[in-house]
Every structure is written in structure tokens, then in C-alpha cells.
Amino acid sequence: MTEWVREYTDALYAWALRKTGDSHLAEDLVQDTFLAAAEGLQNFEGNSSPKTWLMAILKYKIANHYRRAINRQTAHPGDDFLQQFFATDGHWLRNARPGNWQSADGNLLSYEEFNAVLNRCIQHLPEAMQACIRLKFLEEKKGAEICQELGVSQTNYWQLVHRAKLQLRKCLDDNWFSRS
Amino acid sequence: MLSCKAATQLMEIKQEKGLTLGQRFQLWMHTLLCDACRQYEKQSRQIDSFLKNKFEAPADPSELKVDTKDLQERVLKRLGE
């Protein structure tokens, strides 16, 4: 195990950091991964490389972390959240109507500044929405599959994705696309 | 006629699992007439691709700005090795 720790910590940590955007969390997850690996060593059959095996454990640990975050969300997301965006008849509030994004193009992520704004916007999402978005893109899973794993209803899942998107869009709009 | 709230919700379902014929028609009608929702749909796709790029880009250890030596030591200590 010592050799594995020396050899693979960098790769595991890089992956965890990329997926979580949180260095403390990434460290904890890497640590948990090695502990689980040490405990389950007899399950390692050697038909995959140690790295692949450790990665699989890490991926499971990451997904599990977000799963728990969503399950912790006890209260149903309230309707007042949507009142920031929509009037009672369900149409856009005047100040929330999406306008044109002039500078949007596919290369934005190469700009460090934009990436920083995007990160901040993701971090500002309520925990359950953040978890939902991260899980959605973590392993390119489909909604139904995620719901099943999470034990949340489909309706609740779509609500979370919808709300997360509304809030992210607003945050990017305020802090990037429409800033003066 | 769909509300904007319902239309933007359907857009998420459309992206991930697809809509029924009836829903597709309703959404098509709505976005035909609603400029704000047309913008929203375009931006929503863009956000999806930002997120996709962000989360799916391969993690490269050489990009690491931190040293994992400390972490390695902590892990080994926990392992009792």
C-alpha cells in the first residue's frame, strides 16, 4: 500500500480536486479511498491496474459524498426560490428576463478569469443543487439513473436541475456577461 | 400556452431524456413566441458545455499546484504504515 500511496496520490488528488473544486474535500476523499482500498485489498484481483482500481473507489467515494448531500436536503425546495425569476403567472419577471449574451463563445473556459467566476457561481449554489449538477456531469449519467442512485423522485431531480440552472445562469449573467 | 417557468423546466428534461410529442409541440410553440425563453435555451446549452468542459476534462497531475507530500504522509499514518 505504501508504494501505491507514493505513486498514485497525485493522480487521485488531481482527479478529486477537478471534480469537487474543494481542496479539503479532495484530500479527505483521497484519504478515504486509500483506507477503503487497504480494507478491501483482498477484493483487488489484479485484472485491472491498481490505479484503475483506486480510481473506481475514488469515483464511488465522490458520488457517495454528493448523494449524501442531496439526501441531507430534508425540506422540499420552496416555491419562493422561483419567485426571484418568475411572476405568479409563471412568466419572467422583468428584471430576470434573459437578454443577449454578446461575448459568449466556446473558448471562454480558457480564460482563467471566466473560470474563476464559474467556480464561484457553482460554489454559491445551495448544497443539494450543487451536488445534483456535479453528479450530472461527474460520470455523464442520465437523470433517471441518478435519481435511482440517490433515491430521490424524478420530479425532485428535475426541479433541482432546473433551479440550479436558473441560478447559475443568473450568476454568470450578473458577474460576467452583463457586467459593465 | 406554457408559462416560461414550465418551458424552462421542459428544456432540462428535453436535454437529458427527451420529451413526448405533445411536450415538444408545446415547447416549440412557446419558444417561437417568447424571445426571453429562446435566449434562455441558448444560454442553458452554453452553460451545459461550460460545465461539461470543466468536469470532464482529464485531470492532469502535472497541473497540480500543490504538493501532495503532506497528504501522502497523513494517509500512511492513518494506514499505520
Image (cartoon, rainbow, N blue to C red):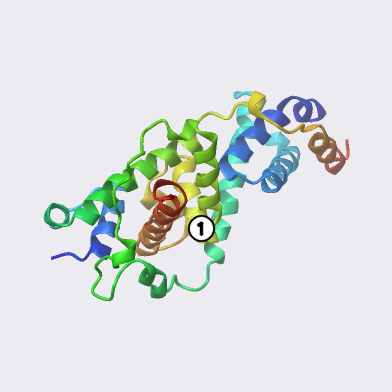
Judged left or right of residue A3, residue A125 is left
Q: Does residue A112 appear anywhere in the picture?
A: yes
Residue A127, by quadrant, is bottom right
Q: How many marks?
A: 1
Compared to residue A38, the image places residue B63 above or below, namely above
Q: Nearer the viewer, residue B77 or B7?
A: B7
Q: Residue at x 29, y 60 (%)?
A: A97
SS under mark 1: loop
Residue at image mark 1: A125
- Give the image location of residue A101, x and y in percent: 33, 45
Residue at 70% across, 29% down: A10
Q: Quadrant of residue A31?
A: top right
Q: Chain of mark 1?
A: A
Q: Amino acid at mark 1?
A: Leu
Q: Quadrant of the N terminus of chain A?
A: top right
Q: Is residue A57 visible?
A: no
Which of these two is toward me, A80 or B22?
A: A80
Left or right: B34, with A118 as reference point? left
A112, A134: nearer the viewer: A112
Q: Residue at x 57, y 58 (%)?
A: A68
Tell which residue pokes out farthest to the front in this image.
A180
Q: Nearer the viewer, residue A49 or B38?
A: B38
